[in-house]
Image (cartoon, rainbow, N blue to C red):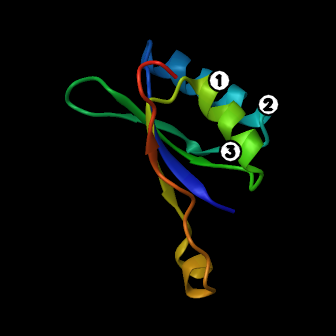
């Protein structure tokens, strides 16, 4: 199953983590290790295991208000020939 590092708007850290976890579950995804991370500028990031269905992934990204994401695959999947999903930045008009 593919993964995305998501850059997402933040709010109070623990509440945002709980919101992200809930939204992920609603869309068939999983917030990995129930963690969100913050950089020195206060920008939030989350590692999310996403469903394989691209339409569901797009709904999830929209619902989380993700501003950018980096598509990833697990090392075992890569060894089996899998390619990561596409990475993207969402422009301001999206």
Q: Which residue is mark 3?
A: 30
Q: Residue at x 69, y 63 (%)?
A: 1
Q: Nearer the viewer, residue 69 or 19?
A: 69
Q: Which residue is mark 1?
A: 63
Which label lies toward us, 1 or 3?
1
Kindly state the secondary structure of the residue where label 2 is placed.
Answer: helix
Q: Which mark is residue 32?
A: none
Q: Nearer the viewer, residue 88 or 34?
A: 88
Cα–Cα gap, marks 2 and 1? 10 Å
- Is 13 above or below relative to 90? above
| Residue 94 drawn at (x, y percent) | 52, 23
| Residue 11 drawn at (x, y percent) | 44, 13
Kindly state the secondary structure of the residue where label 1 is placed.
Answer: helix
| Residue 57 drawn at (x, y percent) | 69, 42
Q: Nearer the viewer, residue 9 or 55?
A: 55
Number of disc labels: 3
């Amino acid at each position: 199953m593919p993964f995305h590092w998501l850059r997402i708007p933040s709010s109070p850290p623990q509440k945002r983590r709980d919101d992200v976890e809930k939204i992920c579950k609603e869309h068939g995804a999983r917030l990995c290790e129930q963690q969100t991370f913050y950089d020195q500028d206060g920008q939030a990031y989350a590692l999310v295991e996403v469903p394989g269905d691209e339409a569901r992934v797009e709904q999830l990204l929209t619902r989380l208000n993700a501003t950018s994401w980096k598509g990833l695959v697990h090392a075992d999947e890569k060894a089996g020939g899998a390619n990561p999903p596409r990475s993207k930045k969402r422009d301001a008009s999206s």
